[in-house]
Structures are given as C-alpha cells and as structure tokens.
C-alpha cells in the first residue's frame, strides 16, 4: 500500500522529467534577426491589422501575456499534448470575453486559408473536436486554445503568430510584411469523425465518411482530405513501387513532433518521386495540398509551387498498411523543403478507435528560418 | 559531527503536498522507464515496457491477451538479453541478469491507462570496477519503433541520500531514443557523481522520519499508547483510569514508554537488516494492527497498568521488523548498513519526538479537566475501529473501515488543532470556574 503511494508521485515526476527533456532538448539556436526569404506577402497586412484590433480589446496585463519576446525557447513552445501536460504561450480563449474571443479568432482567420474543410474552417472544426472530447473527459475543449504573438505584430519587423492547444499548433512567421514560414504546423484529431443533429453529437465509430450535410445532420471530418490524399497517393503505386516505399521501422507517433526541431533524417528513405508517372506525381502533390492550404491562400499557392518544383527530389514512404486505418499506419512525404507525416495512433478518449497525428514541417522555412538547430 | 536541524517545516510542507490531489501529467506515448538502483557492488533496475509499443516492436500478440505474461515471459527475457548490455568506460562487459517479468497496470492521464511488463534486472561490473560509471546499450522497442523513448533515471543511490522510499524524485540520467537524423540508437553514458557517507546518513535519517510521519499506523500506535500516560490507574473491582498523575509523572511515563518502544524496534531493525531474522511482511503488518487494538483497549480500561514499558518494548520489536525490510532492500555494504541503522533510528526518534512535542502538552492540560474522559474515550474508540479495519485488510478481508483508517493521516493536523482548542478551552474554563479535577 505504501509502495503504491510512492509510485504515483514518482511516476508523475518521472513523466514530467521526460516531457521536460523532449521539449527543451532543441540545441542552441539563435534568432538571426533577419529570418529567411519571403514566401509571399500573403495576408500579412490583414493579419497585423487584426492583431492590433485584438490587442486593442485587451487590458495592459492581457496584452503583456499575448505579446512575448521571440526567443528560440518561446518559438518552439508548442505541443500536441493536452494543455494540462504542456503549457502554451499566450492567452487561452476561455479567459477572454465574447468580444475579445471574436477578435482573437479574427486574427487566426486572417492568417489561414479559405478552402472548405481546410485553413480556418478546419481550425474551427479541430476546436469543435476538442469540445466533443471535453464532453467525456476533462482537460479538453475549445477554451484551451491559446493565441500568442512573439514580438509585436508589424509589417516591418519580424514576428511569429502562435495559435494552438491540444492537437493543433500554428507557427506562422512574418518578416517585413511577408510570410517567411508557415511551419511547424501540428494537426491531430480525436474523434476523427462525428456528426451533429440538432444538439445531439454522435461520434462515428466505424469508418470515416466525407464531411457534409444531409438533412438536419452535419458530418464533421476535419482531416478527411489529409487522410484521403495520402491513401490515394499510396493506392496509385504499383506493388513494386510500394515495396520500395515501405519502411522497415515502425512509427507510433510522428517522428518530428514538438521538440524535434531540425532533426530531419540526413538521408531520405522510401520511394523517389522522380521515377513516378505524371499521374502519380499529381497524386503526391494532391496529398501535400491539404496541409499547405491551412495557411493563407496566397502563401499556400506559393509554397505548393515550390514543393511541386522540388517533386523530383522528393521521397514518399510508409509503414504499416496503406489504408491508414490501423494503429502505427504511417506515411511520410520528404522533399528538399516539404516534410509531412501522418500517423494513426491508439485512441486516447475513444479507446476502441484510432486517432490521427500529423505534422507539416519545412526543411528550410520552419520558424521563418530564424534558428539553427 | 552535528545532527542536521530537524526539518520540521519541510516535513509539514511535504505532508501538505502529499494531501493535494495529483496533477494529471502526460507523455506523448507510453514510454519505457528504466529505474536504476546503485549499490556498492552491482546495479539493480526495474525495467517497465508498455505492452502496446512492445507489440509494435515484436509483433507478439500482447494487447487484450489475458495470458500475455505466461505466453511471452520467456521470450521477453531472451529479447531483453539481446537488447540490454553495459560496459565499463574502458569497454569491459558487465554481467547482465534478467529476472522474471510481471504485468502491471499504469494510469497515465493523457494517454489513458495501459499495461506494461515490469522486469527486474541486475547489472554487475567486472571485479574492481565502479558501479557509478558505465555505458548503457539499450535498444529494446526503440530499435524498431523509432518514435519510442526510454527514460533512464536513478531511483536509489545511498551515497547521495537517494532512496525512492522517502519519495525523493528520481535523478534523471537521460532519454534513449533513436536519433531521427541518423536512425541510430545512441549509447547512454551513466556517470554519477560520488556521494559520501554524510549524504547517505542524512538520506536514511529523513527516511526514518518519513516512516513515522507517513506511517499512520505507527503514529496511531504511539498516540494511543500515550493517551492514558498522564493518568493514574485505579485497580479495584472495576479497573478504570483515575486522576491526573501530575506533570512530572506524566512526562516520565512518556519518556519511559517511547524509550522502551525505541529499544524494541532498534533491536529487531538490527536483526532484520542484517537478515538474521527474516519474517514476511504480512503477519507483521497484522500484528501491528493488533498492537494498536491492545493499546486502544488499554486506553479505555487499564489492562496492563505498570507494565506499559514491557508492552511498548514488545510492540517495538514488531514495529522494528516492519521497518527492517526497507533497509534490507537497499542492499548496502556493512559500513553503510551500520550508518543506516543509526540514521534510520535517529530519524524515527526525531519524528516521534516532534509528534510527542506537539501532542503531549495538550493531553497533559486536558488530563486536568473533565473533558479528558470523553476525549480519551473517543480517541481510543477511533483507534479500536481503525485497528480492526487494518486487521481485516491485512488478513485479507478488505473493508470500508480499513480504507477509512488509511485516510486518518489526512485528518491528523485537524485533530491536533481540535485537541489544542479543547485543551485551552477546558483549562481556561476550569480555572474560571475553579472546578476541581475529577478524582473518582
């Protein structure tokens, strides 16, 4: 009995120690101040306007919680863990008044894409998914999403927009009125699909239908396109190509999650996209698109163009099965710039189901190329 | 050599924190933990491997398999032999012994509950090599599941006063994880600073204090034994507790009782730690419950007046046996054992003295008022109930009374406050009203 009493704080302490390590072991990077090349001007000016409008609704104390100094430590503070287990920068939506909350979400909306089920639409659905989780377990919910500005938003200086909570982390870097980095961007989802009829929420336990509305029932599946894009990409490969794309290792999570900044594998593994047919290459690009579309449309188009130009030096790889329906099913796209991982994990709250973790990084544009990891 | 200042405040704080609900912490995925115990001639360890990640690494059918342990236990040991090794800094191999796995359930807030195999391991360096510096090669699970991590920490290290029994936090050594850049699993160098005998002594001293502070049953026994100490036994046809025996006599009684208890448990602690006597925990724990029951009955009606010393000493023998398994587990050198016995005993004494110092003044005050009879009766009755609950628990009859008794410790500070308030009130009232002490 006494041993059990000791075991609880001990294991908690150990877990804390472990978490600390994974989030702080990021090497000694420094903010170069200049940042990387501009990707596009995107909606930088609108984002700054929205940011200032949001700041104007806040008290001085709140403003100092939102606007932080852009250090490597603050920049890399994001996670895929519930906020009870890993703190976020900035102010939680739950701490804001209705007016402040609307102004905060307007900033996110200005910075993100307008495509259906992507960008801002996907973002609000990810928050809604957390509200579904909150219905059965504490520590979740759309109130536990945080907004922070690292450095004062401006169209002249360098600053970073952070918005995230459990299963979502936006890190968009602006410099001199242009977007210089849209990554790292973490996206996860549990439950992966659910429907709402009136005020009744129904978690869909088998399969995951396309999102849409039928009668009075709306089906939500915020990462449907992401999953389908990857499945289609793999389905387009011949069995010989699949054999080349298959990794011998197993993935129970994304490889380059929080704290794993700059840890890209030194050699790319899997199947070279250069050897694929035009149709197959189009499927690879289509698989990349749902991630890229989360940032504002202009920047998304610019980045997709860059990733398309680099397709011949890009590799795709997978582990587990190609259906992306079982635990440890995993797929990766690794190019000179683009890095996307998608993995199926055990359910945490809905234990009979899997849930998704995904990360989008950019070899040369993470955090606007401000840090050397 | 000066004794350390009794860290009363830090203990009170520790008690407060122990009562606070634990904050839910989480880790991305269940991790393997490797907790090392450094001994003078070997390193022992507990290795905990989460079943879901092990299944991914080995393709064994572990999840939802009720006979996973029986079916895969032997294979697990073979697997670990291939994936665990240690060498001296100069490259000489250590002997590795893999023990029998067990299966246990882990509660982890953000990843939900999961099962893990716990495997005891013994690592023995070549003759003459230190157990404080070695290189660990461990790649079970991570050789295949590249997103898995292994948290390595030191759980016990006598030289630095580290023992998980006093709730010390483990000292983190490092995390073993496949390097995403290279795909390699790095070796983990373990290089622990030398401690010294003083740190070891202080660590065990604190452990002794903790044993009393957190051992609700030991505390209750002591307090129950002290409850009638200020009173004179009246041994007629209906033996009962009579008048206040005077402060001098009360204090003398208390000193005698605690000393006899100390002598008793010191003796068995010595015998148990040296493994001269080796008694299983279960009957000892049950006997401790009996000891509380007997003292509680005595506090209600004198059943062994004048023989408190013998009884306290005798029960001390039993309580000492319960402490001794803790020290024996640390697997110390003879010199460390000697220092530990001294440190542990002094820690127990220090905590007992603190408890007595904050309790007895109120009992002595109260004993001079009419309030003492109901207070003593209530206290002793609670102790009777708690001891019966524990006795039930410890002979295998789980009962709500036992669960309630376990939580008595939490009520301790409040009970003490109430006692103090009653004592002051009763004493002031007696003075004001010039009431005599009940002498019948």
Image (spheres, coloured by chain):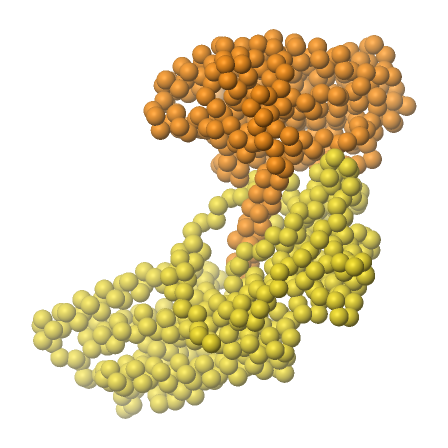
Chain colours: A orange, B yellow
Where A236 falls versus B271 (above or below)?
above
Where A106 falls versus A24 (above or below)?
above
Where B418 falls versus A145 (above or below)?
below
Q: Nearer the viewer, residue B93 or B206?
A: B93
Q: Nearer the viewer, residue B435 or A60?
A: A60
Identify the residue shown where x is 31% and y is 85%.
Answer: B252
Figure quadrant of the C terminus of chain B: bottom left
Q: Nearer the viewer, residue B197 or B14?
A: B197
Q: Quadrant of residue B3?
A: bottom left
- Determine the residue located farthest toward the left in the rendered image: B433
Q: Quadrant of residue A184?
A: top right
- The picture places residue B254, in percent across and down from the top left corner, at 34, 81
Q: Quadrant of residue A326?
A: top right
Identify the residue shown where x is 56% and y is 13%.
Answer: A178
- The picture places residue B187, in percent across and down from the top left corner, at 75, 49
Identify the residue shown where x is 46% and y is 69%.
Answer: B209
Say if residue B18 shows up in the picture. yes
Count of labels in the image: 0
Q: Nearer the viewer, residue B92 or A273?
A: B92
- The picture places residue B355, in percent across and down from the top left corner, at 36, 70
Say if residue A143 shows up in the picture. no
Identify the residue shown where x is 46% and y is 28%.
Answer: A68
- The picture places residue A256, in percent across and down from the top left corner, at 68, 32
């Amino acid at each position: 009995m006494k041993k059990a009493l000791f075991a609880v704080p001990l294991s908690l302490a150990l877990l804390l120690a472990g978490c600390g390590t994974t989030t702080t072991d990021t090497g000694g990077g420094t903010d170069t101040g200049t940042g990387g090349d501009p990707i596009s001007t995107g909606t930088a000016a609108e984002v700054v306007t929205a940011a200032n409008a949001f700041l104007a609704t806040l008290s001085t104390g709140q403003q100092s919680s939102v606007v932080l100094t852009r250090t490597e430590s603050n920049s890399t503070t994001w996670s895929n863990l519930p906020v009870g287990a890993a703190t976020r920068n900035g102010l939680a939506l739950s701490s804001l008044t209705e007016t402040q909350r609307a102004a905060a979400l307007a900033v996110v909306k200005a910075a993100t894409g307008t495509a259906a089920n992507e960008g801002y639409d996907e973002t609000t659905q990810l928050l809604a998914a957390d509200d579904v989780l909150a219905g059965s377990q504490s520590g979740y919910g759309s109130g536990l999403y945080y907004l922070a500005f690292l450095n004062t938003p401006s169209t002249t200086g360098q600053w970073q927009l952070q918005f995230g909570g459990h299963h979502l982390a936006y890190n968009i870097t602006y410099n001199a009125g242009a977007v210089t980095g849209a990554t790292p961007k973490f996206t996860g989802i549990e439950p992966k699909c659910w429907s709402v009829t009136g005020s009744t929420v129904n978690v869909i336990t088998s399969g995951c239908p396309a999102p849409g509305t039928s009668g009075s029932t709306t089906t939500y599946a915020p990462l449907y396109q992401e999953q389908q894009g990857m499945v289609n990409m793999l389905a387009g490969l011949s069995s010989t190509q699949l054999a080349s794309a298959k990794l011998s290792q197993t993935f129970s999570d994304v490889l380059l999650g929080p704290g794993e900044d700059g840890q890209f594998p030194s050699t790319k593994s899997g199947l070279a996209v250069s050897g694929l047919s035009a149709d197959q290459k189009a499927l690879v690009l289509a698989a990349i698109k749902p991630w890229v579309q989360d940032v504002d449309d202009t920047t998304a188009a610019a980045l997709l163009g860059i990733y398309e130009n680099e397709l011949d030096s890009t590799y795709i790889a997978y582990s587990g099965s190609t259906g992306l329906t079982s635990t440890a099913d995993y797929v990766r796209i690794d190019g000179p710039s683009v890095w996307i991982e998608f993995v199926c994990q055990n359910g945490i709250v809905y234990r009979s189901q899997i849930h998704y973790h995904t990360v989008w990084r950019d070899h040369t544009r993470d955090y606007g190329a401000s840090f050397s990891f | 050599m000066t004794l350390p200042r009794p860290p009363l405040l830090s203990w009170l704080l520790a008690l407060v924190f122990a009562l606070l609900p634990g904050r839910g912490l989480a880790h991305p995925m269940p991790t393997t933990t490797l907790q090392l115990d450094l001994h003078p001639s070997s390193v022992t360890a507990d290795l905990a491997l989460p079943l879901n990640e092990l299944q991914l690494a080995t393709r064994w059918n572990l999840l939802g398999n009720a006979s996973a342990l029986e079916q895969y236990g032997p294979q697990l040991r073979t697997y670990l032999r291939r994936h665990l090794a240690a060498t001296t800094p100069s490259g000489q191999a250590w002997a590795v012994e893999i023990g029998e796995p067990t299966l246990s359930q882990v509660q982890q807030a953000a990843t939900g509950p999961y099962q893990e195999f716990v495997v005891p391991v013994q690592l023995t360096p070549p003759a003459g090599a230190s157990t404080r510096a070695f290189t660990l090669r461990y790649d079970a699970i991570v050789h295949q599941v590249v997103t898995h991590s292994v948290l390595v920490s030191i759980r016990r290290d006598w030289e630095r006063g580290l023992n998980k029994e006093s709730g010390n936090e483990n000292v983190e050594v490092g995390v073993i994880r496949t390097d995403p850049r290279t795909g390699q699993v790095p070796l983990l160098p373990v290089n622990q600073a030398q401690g010294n005998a003083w740190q070891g002594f202080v660590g065990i001293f604190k452990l002794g204090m903790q044993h009393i502070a957190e051992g609700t049953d030991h505390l209750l026994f002591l307090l129950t034994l002290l409850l009638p100490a200020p009173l004179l036994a009246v041994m007629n046809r209906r033996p009962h507790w009579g008048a206040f025996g005077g402060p001098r006599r009360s204090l003398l009684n208390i000193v005698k009782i605690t000393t006899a208890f100390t002598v008793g448990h010191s003796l068995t602690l010595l015998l148990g730690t040296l493994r001269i006597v080796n008694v299983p925990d279960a009957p000892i724990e049950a006997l401790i419950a009996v000891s509380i029951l007997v003292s509680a009955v005595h506090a209600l009606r004198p059943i062994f007046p004048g023989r408190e010393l013998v009884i306290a000493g005798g029960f001390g023998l039993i309580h000492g046996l319960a402490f001794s398994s803790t020290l024996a587990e640390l697997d110390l050198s003879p010199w460390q054992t000697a220092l530990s016995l001294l440190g542990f005993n002094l820690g127990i004494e220090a905590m007992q003295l603190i408890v007595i110092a904050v309790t007895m003044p109120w009992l002595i005050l109260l004993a001079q008022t009419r309030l003492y009879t109901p207070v003593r009766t209530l206290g002793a009755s609670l102790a009777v109930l708690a001891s019966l609950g524990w006795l039930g628990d410890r002979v295998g009859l789980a009962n709500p009374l036992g669960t309630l008794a376990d939580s008595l410790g939490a009520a301790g500070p409040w009970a003490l406050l109430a006692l103090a308030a009653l004592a002051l009130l009763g004493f002031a009232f007696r003075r004001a009203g010039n009431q005599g002490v009940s002498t019948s």
